[in-house]
Every structure is written in C-alpha cells, then in structure tokens.
C-alpha cells in the first residue's frame, strides 16, 4: 500500500520555499550517487513560484536533466505552455538554473498529438535509464478533480500501462503526459498541493479506500513514501 507523508506550509509563499528546498535536496542526493540527475516537473502557478526560488540556487545545474511531466499540445511560445513557464522561471537567463539541460515535450512541430506522445516516449528512453524510465524526482500537482499530470478521470490516459507517454485530454485541450508506470518508477515522488479548492482531492488521495478511477492520482504508487507538500488551506483537518 502506498504511504503518504504530509508536510504543511503556512501559506503559498512558504510552500514555494519548501518545494524549492526539497527539489534542491533531491538533486544533491542524486548527484552524490550518479553523474547526472533527472527530474520531472509540473506546470502551475504554485510550482512556478518554487522554480523562481530554485533558479537562484547554485547547484551543478549542467548535470541536471529537466523534463515536464505533462505539456499542453500548443506552441512553445503559447501563454499556456508549461515549457514557456519553465523558461521564464527555472531556466531564466542570468540565473544559475538556466544551465540545466531542458528536454521539452515535442508538440505542434509534429502533425498530431499522438505523434508527439510517441516522440516524447522515445526522448525519455534517451534521457533516463530503466524500463520504465526512472527519474530521481517526480514533482506532481493535484487537480480538484483528482487528476495528476494529464491523467484525467473518465479518460483513456490513466489506463495506459504499456507506453511511457500518451495523449491526455482534459479541459478542452490535447496534452502529452507521462503515464502511471513512469510516474510510479521515480525514486522520489513529491505532490505540491495548494488552496482550499484542493482539500477534497487531497483527502481522497490519501484515503486507502479511494478508487483510482475517480482519483487517477492514486495510480502513482512508488516503492518509497510519497511526500505531500500542502498549505494550510489544502491540508486543514487532514
């Protein structure tokens, strides 16, 4: 059974600080053991604040491979692009974090979302070792409907077990997403949860009796304890 540990932050700013510290520590640990570290990051406003802090840390960024856990099937300069957000935060020019090796998800330069998913899966096997590919850190968000990455309830993406990337469809957009086997293979999994609107979803995530069909985030089942970083609004009473 998957185990969860909740670490509480006082407010969104404190949550960003905690997240940056944990990501930095995971990178340090990985680089103590291996030549390179591979991390998968999520989109969203709360992670963006953490990345702005993390970008200023003087880590061996040139030995860090950065991948997105999911990406909207849009151009890289689209306002909704997670890659664009990363380039404006963690990878911003002039910051130490800009020296990380970013491997963006191929999107509209390919003819279909399905072709992008295939190309992303091929990229993963080059960046990471393992079958499925193993990341040192998997940073995930949690939607108010219980989705994580782009594994939305009631869609086909959460059911995919034989591919490392697939097309997730949610909120009117095609998205390219890591699949549950890759999310679960990570050495460390960290959920970042903020806001009162996520309280019910977080309650369902840590509930042993909750169905993964209703809450696809339950499909993330690493061999190690999952750390949940949550602010007071999201974790009240848990």
Image (cartoon, rainbow, N blue to C red):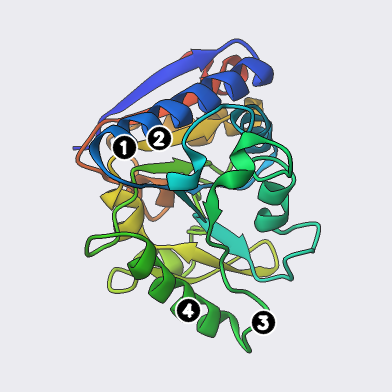
Placement of 112 over or under 39, stated as above or below: below
Q: Residues within 10 Å of mark 1 (few under 14, many from 20)?
A: many
N-terminal-most mark, 3 or 2: 2
* Disc 2: which residue: 27
Residue nearest the viewer, comparing 54 with 17 = 54
3 and 1 marks in contact (CB < 8 Å)? no
Discs 3/1, front: 1
Q: According to the image, label 3 marks what residue?
A: 109
Residue 222 at x, y percent in the picture: 25, 43
Residues marked 4 and 3 touching at CB (< 8 Å): no
Helix, strand or loop at label 4? It is helix
In which quadrant of the rendered view does residue 34 lie?
top left
- Secondary structure beneath label 2: helix
In three-dimensional space, the C-alpha distance between marks 2 and 4, rounded to whole angstroms, equals: 26 Å
- Upstream in the sequence, badge 2 or badge 4? 2
Pointer 1 residue: 30
């Amino acid at each position: 059974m998957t185990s969860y540990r909740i670490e509480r932050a006082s407010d969104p700013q404190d949550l960003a600080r905690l997240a940056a510290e944990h990501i930095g520590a995971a990178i340090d640990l990985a680089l103590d053991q291996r030549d390179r570290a591979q991390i998968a990051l999520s989109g969203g406003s709360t992670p963006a604040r953490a990345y702005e802090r993390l970008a200023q840390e003087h880590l061996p960024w040139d030995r860090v491979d950065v991948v997105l856990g999911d990406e909207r099937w849009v151009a890289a300069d689209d306002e909704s692009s997670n890659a664009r957000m990363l380039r404006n935060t963690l990878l911003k020019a002039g910051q130490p974090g800009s020296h990380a090796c970013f491997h963006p998800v191929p999107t509209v330069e390919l003819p279909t979302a399905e072709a992008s998913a295939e190309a992303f899966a091929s990229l993963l096997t080059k960046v990471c070792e393992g079958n499925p590919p193993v990341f040192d850190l998997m940073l995930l968000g949690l939607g108010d409907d219980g989705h994580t990455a782009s594994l939305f309830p009631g869609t086909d993406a959460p059911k995919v077990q034989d591919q490392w990337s697939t097309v997730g469809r949610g909120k009117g957009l095609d998205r390219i997403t890591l699949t549950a086997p890759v999310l679960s293979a990570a050495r460390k999994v960290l959920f970042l949860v903020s806001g009162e609107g996520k309280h019910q979803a977080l309650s369902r995530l840590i509930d042993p009796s909750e169905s993964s069909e209703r809450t696809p985030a339950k499909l993330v089942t690493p061999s190690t304890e999952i750390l949940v970083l949550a602010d007071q609004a999201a974790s009240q009473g848990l």
